[in-house]
Image (spheres, grey):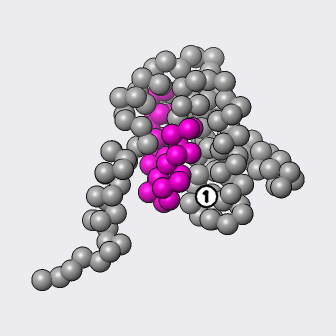
Amino acid sequence: MSIPRKGSKSARSKSLKRNYPKGLVLPESEIRELAGNLRIREAPRAAICLLIVDKAARAIGKDKSESGELNLRLIKEMAAEEECRQIRRIIKAIIAAIGHGAEGIDAARLTITRFIELAFENHPGSDSAEGPYNNKLRKFRRAA
């Protein structure tokens, strides 16, 4: 009889399922509703905003030091600046999930992907967020 290791894959997947059903920070029905209520004129800005948040979350997952803290501040600032209620709701859920470590970051990134899939047939690629992400991060570095 073998004893499962503490950090085994099955233990991580059970934890992911318990904290984030279907690997998302919000229930899929709520994501679907938020995406459905998004106005057409808000869509391009919302996509770029969420792609910036995705890049920042990915950076947080890779780097827990000062850069990770700057990226978390960037995400919080994006939530404060966002005018669209639906996007603000998603970003706030993402901020809460990031506090749960790698599992929460994965769920946050999957949530962004799912929202964009539901909201847009032809969504901008992640490369379109590169410039705005770097500009915002540079601004936070100067301020820090």
**Residue 81 on the magenta segment:** no
**Number of numbered discs visible in the structure rendering:** 1
| Magenta region | 91-119
Residue 74 position, x and y percent, is 70, 46
Residue at the right extreme of this rendering:
142
* Horizontal relation, residue 2 to residue 100: left or right: left
Quarter of the image for residue 118 reads top left
**Residue drawn 71% across the image and 40% down it:** 77
Judge whether residue 129 can be spotted in this image.
no
Q: Which residue is mark 1?
A: 60
Q: Nearer the viewer, residue 133 or 29?
A: 29
**Label 1's element?**
helix
Residue at the bottom extreme of this rendering:
1
Residue 26 position, x and y percent, is 42, 37
Is 25 rendered above or below residue 89? below
Indicate the amino acid at tag 1.
Ile
* Horizontal relation, residue 77 to residue 46: left or right: right
**Residue drawn 47% across the image and 25% down it:** 34
Instruction: Provide the major secondary structure of the magenta segment.
Output: helix
Quarter of the image for residue 60 reads bottom right
Q: Residues within 10 Å of mark 1 (few under 14, many from 20)?
A: many
Q: Nearer the viewer, residue 27 or 54?
A: 27
Viewport quadrant of the C terminus: bottom right
Residue 12 position, x and y percent, is 34, 63
**Residue 97 on the magenta segment:** yes
**Residue drawn 67% across the image and 66% down it:** 65
**Residue drawn 68% across the image and 34% down it:** 80
Is 88 rendered above or below residue 4? above
